[in-house]
């Protein structure tokens, strides 16, 4: 079982036979060497020892409880960025460009943002104070950045840690683009780049919370978008 909550702020063949020449066994690598050569080739191609894709898909299917918080966050971020890039390309928008400063602010926000609060979550900082211009603007200032025109989208996905996977988490986050009618497509417009001047620059932060008593894992994602390359 899993659930997703979202929040967004706008501004802010033919065959033939061939005669094969007989090879000189003395010139053939032994079995051990052949195996090593094959393994080296698979490694070079980013594949597993059996020739299967080893780019992370199998890891993304592991249960959340079998992964560390950092593994979950890293894999979820990578897969989500890949998805958004594909969606922006399909929409004829410029590619997403990750910005280190936006990443820093997004991670600070992700460390405490409570998506369950809805729209109010965008205005409240870690100390519980309400800020009309957006909590993300205040957090940016606390890190020494002046970022007056940010767009923010937040969401969390909660799953049974024994059965949910990173793949499931990312599938939930994808609905910010594929099924965002309940939010008037505000998440979609930000992520795709329909808002602003394309919102090409972005930062992402993630937080992983584990509830040992109920055996659940909740992943919160914070996305900041901007037209400015800070």
Image (cartoon, grey):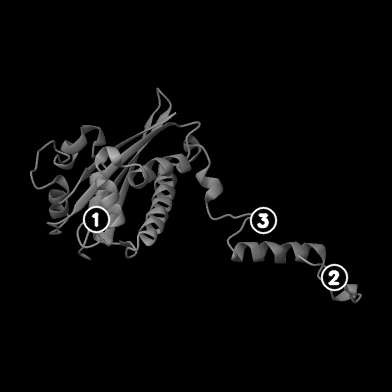
Instruction: Say left or right for 19 vs 139.
Output: right
Residue at image location 43% in from the left, 51% down from the top: 79
* Disc assigned to residue 212: none
Residue carrying label 2: 16
Question: x%, y% of residue 122?
Answer: 17, 42
Tell which of 215 and 176 is nearer to you. Answer: 176
Q: Quadrant of residue 207?
A: top left
- The N terminus is located in which quarter? top left
Question: x%, y% of residue 201?
Answer: 27, 61
Q: Badge 1: how crowded within 10 Å, few (<14), some, or many (20+)?
A: many
In the current view of this chain or complex, which residue is farthest to the top? 213
Question: x%, y% of residue 83?
Answer: 41, 53
Residue carrying label 3: 49
Residue carrying label 1: 225
As measured in the structure, the alpha-carbon distance from the residue carrying label 2 to the one carrying label 1 is 57 Å
* Kind of element beneath mark 2: loop
Question: x%, y% of residue 181?
Answer: 29, 40
Q: Earlier in the sequence, mark 3 or mark 1?
A: 3
Q: Are marks 2 and 1 in contact (CB under 8 Å)?
A: no
Q: Are marks 3 and 1 in contact (CB under 8 Å)?
A: no
């Amino acid at each position: 079982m899993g659930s997703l909550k979202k929040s967004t702020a706008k501004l802010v063949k033919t065959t033939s036979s061939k005669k094969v020449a007989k090879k000189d066994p003395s010139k053939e690598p032994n079995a051990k060497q052949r195996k090593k050569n094959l393994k080296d080739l698979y490694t070079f191609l980013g594949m597993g020892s059996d020739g299967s894709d080893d780019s992370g898909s199998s890891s993304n299917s592991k249960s959340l409880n079998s992964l560390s918080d950092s593994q979950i966050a890293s894999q979820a971020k990578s897969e989500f960025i890949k998805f958004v890039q594909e969606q922006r390309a399909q929409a004829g928008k410029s590619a997403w460009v990750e910005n280190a400063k936006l990443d820093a602010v997004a991670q600070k926000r992700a460390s405490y943002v409570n998506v369950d609060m809805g729209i109010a979550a965008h205005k409240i900082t870690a100390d519980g104070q309400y800020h009309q211009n957006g909590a993300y603007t205040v957090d940016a200032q606390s890190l020494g950045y002046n970022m007056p025109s940010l767009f923010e989208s937040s969401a969390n996905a909660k799953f049974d840690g024994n059965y949910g996977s990173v793949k499931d988490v990312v599938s939930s986050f994808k609905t910010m683009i594929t099924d965002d009618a309940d939010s008037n497509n505000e998440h979609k417009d930000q992520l795709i780049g329909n808002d602003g001047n394309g919102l090409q620059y972005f930062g992402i932060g993630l937080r992983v919370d584990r509830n040992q008593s109920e055996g659940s894992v909740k992943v919160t994602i914070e996305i900041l978008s901007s037209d400015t390359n800070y």
